[in-house]
Amino acid sequence: MTAETVAAPAAAPTLRRRLLVFGGILLGMLLSTLDQSIIGAALPSVVHDLGGLEHFAWVFTGYGLTLSITTIVGGKLGDLFGHRVVYLSGVVVFVTGSMLCGLSGNMTQMIAFRVVQGIGGGALVVASFSLIGQLFEPAERAKYAGYSTSVFAVASVAGPLLGGVVTDAVGWRWAFYVNLPLGLLTLVAVAFLLPGSATRGRPKIDYPGAALLAALSVCVALLAGRAGSLDAVLSARGIGLIVAIVVIVPVWIAVERRAAEPMIPLSLFGKSTVVLSNAITMLAGFAILATVNFLPLFLQAASGASALTSGLVLIPMMFGLVATSTLVGRRIARTKKYRWFPVASMAVAALASYLLSTMDADTPWLLVVAYSVLLGIGSGLSMQVFVVAVQGCVPPAQIGTATATVTYARLVGASFGVSAFGAVFSSRLATELPKHLPGGSAQTMTNLTAAALDKLPDDVRHGFTGAYADSLGSVFFIAVPVLLVALVLSLGLRDRALGE
């Protein structure tokens, strides 16, 4: 039995009902994306209460690993059983994981429950975009996908601020409990307003393919954590991970060729739009998302901004992203074409990355904001385009799987990008500190708050800010050639007319 014969959709809901459902979908996206940023502000308090400092990184790693794995599996299960079912299941699992995280008594429990959260979060993300693909016609998808990018922008800015406020006011456990009322609202919106799909037959689930993909994702994530250091990559464990990936990939391909319902149909990779969209998405995730992660460090260490100020300075960048993404979505809805937006996106983002690489400790904040806004515009020009592109070139029964590949590619690219940027930064900082500090001292400073910098003697403070600024300039420049490669690949995208 093929995926095309599995789901028989019920009568299409009215536009008003679809818009209400869309609002619920946005709440679900907010659940998952906000949690990734809100926990960062609460983590110091979590470690203080629960201990386990040596394992705290797994609070993020465990969530990220299961998020990426569930993205692929959830996309396929949505194609087989309906994206509404996957979405609602994701909400329930995510909210349950959130409640358990809030009740954690030690770091081991916290990590385990974050894994549960990641399972629900992955299902939420992929099912959200897949439901948008089902609710709206191909040309309209870009418009609504554009609106959804505002959720990511709001979460990335509001998350750290909200996390700090909630933690200071009522304690870190409420940083998790806040997900419960949001989860209830999105359950009501989707469960009662979106009709289910009638399922015929019993689809065969590709358990071996799912297991191999999970193993591959774990190996890729662990290798990404080592990608910033050549010594770490060439260590016994690094080489072991590379060997495991080389072995798993052909085995997975062989399994997928024989599977009745492959987790990712290999036929997808015969479509140039899918291949190019995933490749460009991975490169953009590597360059743009990693750059965004290092901008607050520049603002705090090189410019002497407080954590709150650095977060506020990034707000204009998110406004640029949201406004551009919304305009692009509306434009695609009118013209039904998208080819040149990724080209413009990579060009603008490459220019922004170059300008960011020219900053130093004396760069005015207005210029920092301007360059950041330009980066946001570059990202917004294509943020939703690749999802719309792959959804438009596959049959309805493969929308979830195709959507999942793009989301997965972005996660993998960002993981490698952050690791690579971090390694270059550490290497450059070790070189720059002796140049900038009085007497050529190579001392480091771990507390890079504005207050801590102000307590230093002027010559030492200028030395630190200058060293960090010059080091981060080299980091930002890494994104330029990566984005230029993405630009060249973007030229290969076919100008496919949506809805025709």
Image: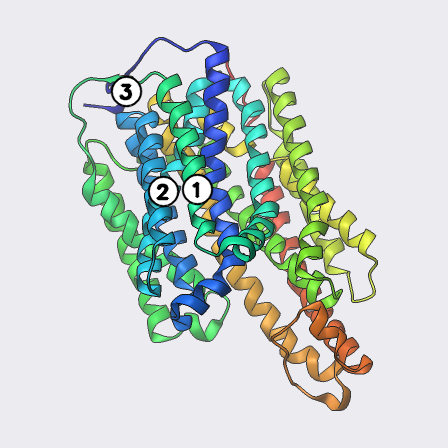
Q: Identify the amino acid type marked 2.
A: Phe
Apparent side of residue 202 relative to residue 365 in the rendered image (left or right): left
Q: Which of marks 3 and 1 is in front?
A: 1
Q: Is residue 125 visible?
A: no
Tell me how far mark 1 sits from mark 2, CA to CA: 9 Å
In the rendered image, the quadrant that contains the N terminus is top left
Toward the viewer: 36 or 472? 36
Q: Which of marks 1 and 2 is nearer the N terminus?
A: 2
Apparent side of residue 106 relative to residue 294 in the rendered image (left or right): left
Residue 233 drawn at (x, y percent):
42, 70
Look at the numbered disc 2 and give the secondary structure of its residue. Answer: helix
Q: Identify the amino acid type marked 3.
A: Glu
State the residue position of label 1.
Answer: 179
State the residue position of label 2.
Answer: 94
Tell me how far mark 2 sits from mark 3, CA to CA: 29 Å
State the residue position of label 3.
Answer: 4
Whether residues under marks 1 and 2 lie with C-beta atoms below 8 angstroms apart, the answer is yes
Q: How crowded is mark 2: few (under 14 residues within 10 Å), some or many (20 or more)?
A: many
Q: Can residue 193 be seen in this view?
A: yes
- Picture quadrant of residue 464: bottom right
